[in-house]
Amino acid sequence: MNHLRIAALVLFVNALILSGGCSNAASGPQAPATNSSEQQPVGGTTTETETKYFTGSIGSSLGLQMKLIRRGDELSGSYFYKKIGTSIALRGAIDKGGNVTLDEFDPRGKQTGKFSGKWQADNDSGLVTIAGDWSKPDSQSKTPFSLQEQPIYFTGGIDIVAKQINETNKKLRYQLSAEYPELTGSIGAGHGKFNREVKALVQKKVSAFKKDVAGPDGDEGAGETMGNDLEISYAVAVANDDLVSIEFEVGSYYSGAAHPNSYSEVVNYDLKNGKLLSLGDLFQPGTKYLEAIASYCIEDLKRQSKAMGSNSMLDDETIETGAAPKAENYESWTITRKGLAITFDAYQVGPYAAGPQHVVIPYSVIQNIANPQGALAQFTK
C-alpha cells in the first residue's frame, strides 16, 4: 500500500475538518491583475489567438498534460499521458456558453476519443479549468476528466513538458515516481541550463532514496512487502520568456517509519541570464527584505489561524519562530502573477497534522524594495 497516499488522504480530511485549513484565499489583500490576458472570455468568439497549457487527469489515475490553441471559437492542440508520452492530436470548438468539445485522433487520423466539458475562468486568478466527461467514439460509457490551466506564457515556439522517472524494485522493496519539467522547442542556452538544473536536482533525490533503501552495505532489508516510496511532483508558479518558477513537492516513506516525510523545494530560474535566482536577487541591495517578508507572513499566518477559531492547529509562538526573518525560514518561495508565494513546510509553523502553510505576499507590499531590474520588475511596475 502506498503510505504517501494514505498520509495525503489523512491530511485532506483534517483540512476539511478545519473548515478549509490555511489557504491562500485567507492570506490578506491580493495585488491587482498584472496581465490583461488574465481576463478570459467565458465562451464564444475571441479575436486573439491564445495558447494555454493544462494539467489534469482522466478518471483518478490517468495523469495528462494538454496544450490548447484557441482561435475564435475553434480549438486545436494535443495531449499526452505523463506515463506514456505519446502525443495525441485534438480538434474541437467552444460555444458562447463555454461548452467545449474536443475530438482526439491517432497518427493515422482515426478518432480515438472525445472530451465534452465546460470552460470556466477563475475570477481571481484568470486561470481556466475544463471539466466534463471523456468517452470513446460511439460509446455510452463516460469517464470524468478535469483540467487546470498552468500559468505558462512562452512565445517563440517554446513548450514545457513533464518528464517521468518511474521504478519498482521488488528486491529492494521500493517504488518511486518522479516528474520534472523540461523546456522544448526553439530553446536557447538559458533554457538548456534550466533543463539540466531541474533534471540533476530530481535525479540526485532519486539516487539518494535508492541508496538509503539499499543501506550502507547494499543490504536488501527484511520483510516481504513493498514498504518504501518516493514521490516527486511539481507545480508551475509562472513560466514566461524571462523566468521559470517551479515548486517541487517531495514525499518519501521508509518501511517501519511512523509516518511519511514531505517537504517542498523550489527552482527559480532566470532564463535570460541562465542562472538560479536567490531570494536576495529580487530586492534592492541593502534593504531589509527578510524583515518585510516575515512581518507580512507572521501577521497573515496569525490571521489564518484566528479565522479557524478553536479548530486551529497553529499557535502564535510557533508561527513567530518558524516565520522569523531568517534566511532558512524562507527557502521555499516562488514567483506568481499575484505575489511572492511562501511555503512553510510541515513542522515549520505548526504540527505535522496541520500540513504545509502558504502565504502570498502581494507585490504592492514589497514593490518599494524590489529590484527595479530584477525578476519582479514585470509584476511590480
Image: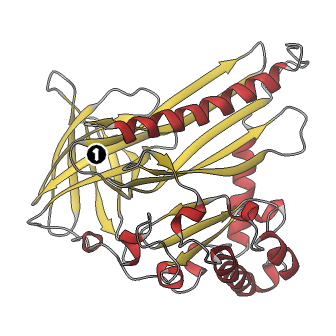
Q: x, y percentage for residue 86?
A: 33, 26
Identify the amino acid type marked 1: Lys
What colour scheme does the image use? secondary structure
Check the picture and name the quadrant holding the C terminus.
Answer: bottom left
Q: Quadrant of the N terminus?
A: top right
> From what the image shows, is residue 282 above or below residue 81?
below
Q: Is residue 30 left or right of residue 74?
A: right
Q: Considering depth in this image, is 80 or 239 the residue closer to the camera?
A: 239
Q: Give the structural element (helix, strand or loop) at label 1.
A: strand
Residue 351 vertical placement versus 247 (above, below): below
Q: Residue 206 falls in which quadrant of the image? A: top right
In the image shown, does 78 or 104 lie closer to the viewer?
78
Residue 233 falls in which quadrant of the image? top right
Write the residue at 31% across / 53% down: 241
Query: Is residue 344 depicted above or below 369 in this figure?
Result: above
The residue depicted at 53 percent of the width and 33 percent of the height is 199
Residue 330: where, in percent of width, then height? 68, 64
Task: Write down the residue under mark 1.
Answer: 67
Residue drawn where x is 74% and y is 28% of the image = 208
In this rendering, would 188 be left or right of 156?
A: right
In which quadrant of the rendered view does residue 57 lie?
A: top left
Residue extending farthest front: 286
- Can you see residue 314? no
Nearer to the camera, 94 or 27: 27
- Image location (x, y in percent) of residue 378: 36, 69
Residue 359 visible to the viewer: yes
- Residue 193 at x, y percent in the picture: 44, 37
Q: Residue at x 28, y 43 (%)?
A: 158
The crowding category of the residue bearing disc 1, from other C-alpha atoms within 10 Å (few below 14, some 14 to 19, many at least 20), is many
Q: Nearer the viewer, residue 262 or 11?
A: 262
Q: What is the tally of numbered marks visible in this picture?
A: 1
